[in-house]
Structures are given as structure tokens and as C-alpha cells.
Image: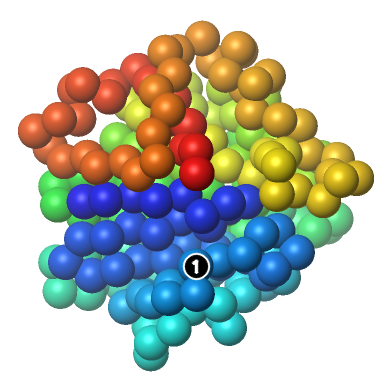
Amino acid sequence: MKIKYLGHSTFKITSDKTIVIDPHDPEYGTLPADLTADIVTVSHSHHDHNYLAGVRGEPKIIDSVGEYDLDNIKITGVPTFHDDSLGVKRGGNIVFVYEIEGLRLSHLGDLGHLLNDDQLNQIGPIDIVMISVGGTYTIDADQAVEVVKQLQAKVVLPMHYKTADSASDSVLAPVDDFVQKMGWKVEKVVQFEINTNNLDRFAGKVIIFSS
């Protein structure tokens, strides 16, 4: 499968079907004009994660917890919170798990807390995790390191951090703090292609996407 980072918390996964995750609105950068998907997953209903107008086609929208079997792809939504106060401050958040081509990927959305045992059991073992690291509205770098350890993820794709496309007054931290605290090797890519045969080559790495 191929994974492309489209800024903020938005990813495009290309396999038997094309999945777009948490499409962001133009305030956070311009999505590709030809962005088309078969499936769109939305972790929560904030404008920087649910810009469905930016995705062409007639995709199946998954924005609720539960299990979804879509031909050769299984998607599971696990309920979590956008803050560390059981959702009092910012509401709920869905962690999605994608089972694709024999690999298990997870996009944590705007997770705002460490995971409890029940959530970890529902999520299960993870090969590749897409995780917020910018803090303020989500877990910060220190907490992100702990969540990666909780999930025992093999490969890390940071997201939701300050970039050149972020607003000038963005309160998000850049990715560097997380990279330093994680202590793993960094591999910079434009597009990330991974499968069961090359997973070991990327194990123990933080993947940073560049344009």
C-alpha cells in the first residue's frame, strides 16, 4: 500500500481501495484538487478533520465507532476523547484501526489522553501508527511517546504539528521535539510504500513526509 501525508492530520492510503483520513479545510493548506476516495474516515466533527467537500467521488463516510468490513479492508472505530477530561473540554474522538494487506494501521485522530486498558484491547496490536504530536489540542510529544509504547507500534507517522502551512500564530509545536524524545531513526519521504515484506526495514523509524 501507499501512504501519502496531506498535512495536518490528513492521510491518503492507496490499496485495493483509496482511503482518505480526516480531510482538513483550506485553513490548514490546500488539498490536491483531484483528491478522490472510496472511503473517508472522520475522527471527529471539527472543521480541520471533516472537510468532506475536499474529497471527490462518492466515498463511504465512516464517522462512528464500530466495525466495518469493506471487501479486503476492515476498519474498526474505537471511542476515545479529545481531551484528558472525558470529553468535557472538546468532546469525543475516534481512533480508527485499518487492516489492509496483512498490516494493522491506526490513526489516532485528536487523541487527548493516554489509552486505558479497555481501549488498548479494542485497538489491538499496531504495525503503523499515525499520531498527533503537536500538543495544546491533543497529546503532546511526551504523551505521544508513551502512547507509541502503549501500542507497541513498529512504525510512527507523526501528524498534527506545526508546519510551513500552519497559520503564523499556530500554537502547535513542531515535530522536532517529538523526534528527539522518541529517539528513533528518522526517514524522510515524499510518499511511503509499505507491505508485509518490507515492514522490518521501517521498524523502529519515525517517518517524516516532505513535499
Residue 119 image position (x, y, % from top left): 49, 45
Position of 195 compared to 170: left or right? left
Q: Give SS at disc 1.
A: loop
Residue 123 image position (x, y, % from top left): 39, 46
Position of 85 compared to 192: left or right? right
Q: Is residue 130 above or below residue 91?
A: above
Position of 68 compared to 63: left or right? left
Is residue 125 shown to the viewer in this render?
no
What is the residue that sits farthest to the bottom in this orientation? Answer: 58
**Given the image, on which type of amino acid does mark 1 rest?**
Pro
Task: Name the foreground residue: 28 vs 206.
Answer: 28
Q: Is residue 110 above or below residue 144?
A: below
Q: Residues within 10 Å of mark 1 (few under 14, many from 20)?
A: few
Q: Is residue 147 above or below residue 97?
A: above
What is the residue that sits farthest to the left in this orientation? Answer: 197
Residue 29 image position (x, y, % from top left): 66, 59
Q: Is residue 141 above or below residue 54?
A: above
All told, the count of numbered labels is 1
Is residue 57 shown to the viewer in this render?
yes
Position of 155 compared to 103: left or right? right
Residue 171 image position (x, y, % from top left): 85, 40
Task: Name the foreground residue: 163 vs 141.
Answer: 163
- Colouring chosen for the image of the structure: rainbow
Task: Name the foreground residue: 146 vs 117.
Answer: 146
Q: Identify the image quadrant of residue 127.
A: top left
Who's the residue at 68% across and 19% down the image?
A: 177
Per the image, the residue denoted by label 1 is 32
Q: Identify the image quadrant of residue 31.
A: bottom right
Who's the residue at 71% across and 42% down the image?
A: 164
